[in-house]
Amino acid sequence: MNQQLKFSIFSTSTVTYGIKNLIGLILLGFSFSALAQKGIHESIAFEKPPVIDGKMDDWPIEWWLDPDGKFLSNVGNDAENLYFRLKVSDDITQAKIGMFGLSLRLNPKGKKKGKVGLKYPVGKDESELKHAKPINISKDVDLAEKVQMKKEWISDVEVVELIGLAKNNIVSSRLGLMNGIESTIIAQEDGSYIYEAKIPFKAFNIKKNEVDLLGVEFETGRLVQKSNNATSSNPGYNPNSRGPGSQPRQYYSNYSYNPLSSPGYLWIGLKLK
């Protein structure tokens, strides 16, 4: 066996085969490296921090693309604060945000399943969902009508839930927060949503100098399909569900599958400046 191996090293076909294998291993290493870097971004540095107002002219960078095509995003920081922006154009994802809310969670260890952050919008409460108009986002709907519908989904969203500061989420007015957190969401005339937020590191006791990689999660709420045999007069409402700051609400559905039943999700690994 050893003699055959020594001989084959000098054969032309084996050399060619060995080179191909070597190239394959190099390319495989590159692919693993690229996979490992998926979702990893360098934080944006600002000459002047952006104002949290839904206007995009103070962000000096192009949008980061989402592999799933649901979100456009950017995240930046300065010495004291983190800054976030999203652009959402997908109809279904927008409906999930408007009906069931959007959570932004942080993990200072760079992992998924962040433990601290905020939920804004918080989504509709039970009475609002019970009387909500049926969601109609078909292609046959007039653009102006669709834009107006999307604006109504996120109208009057002034409540924020702070995640991770207590056993239950802390519910506060968006404008009444005293720890420097800011957030806004605006429906554009083209039907897209623009979301912006600012979170001071100190708001969640994050020590910036000790963070090698910050995990950033965006996740929409979703319709929870509990049963195909609804007993309520409204098949999308369960009167035993709980509100903000408690367990997720439960909803019924008459359908085996509903496109609102899976959350929209984006994870970013952020290298801080």
Image (cartoon, rainbow, N blue to C red):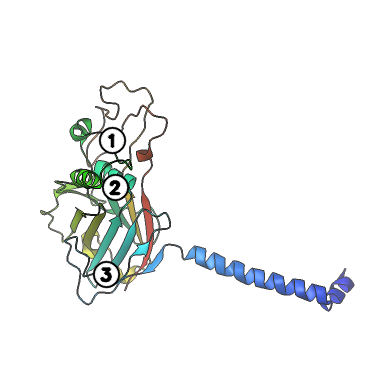
| Disc nearest the viewer among 2 and 3 | 2
**Image quadrant for the C terminus?**
bottom left
Residue linked to disc 2: 94
| Disc nearest the viewer among 2 and 1 | 2
Along the viewing direction, whichever of 104 and 155 lies nearer the viewer: 155
Q: Position of residue 123 (x, y in %)?
A: 23, 43
Q: Amino acid at mark 2?
A: Gln
Q: Residue at x 49, y 64 (%)?
A: 36
Badge 1 crowding class, 10 Å Cα cut-off, few under 14, some 14 to 19, many 20 or more, is: many
Q: Position of residue 51 (x, y in %)?
A: 17, 66
Residue linked to disc 3: 77
Q: Which mark is residue 123?
A: none
Badge 3 crowding class, 10 Å Cα cut-off, few under 14, some 14 to 19, many 20 or more, is: many
Residue linked to disc 1: 249
For the residues bearing labels 3 and 1, Cβ distance under 8 angstroms:
no
Q: Amino acid at mark 3?
A: Asn
In this view, the residue farthest toward the left is 176
Q: Amino acid at mark 1?
A: Arg
Query: What is the CA distance from the residue labelled 2 to the residue labelled 3?
Result: 26 Å
Which image quadrant for residue 198?
A: bottom left
Q: Position of residue 157 (x, y in %)?
A: 16, 47
Q: Position of residue 249 (x, y in %)?
A: 28, 35
Sequence-wise, which precedes: disc 2 or disc 1? Answer: 2
**Image quadrant for the N terminus?**
bottom right
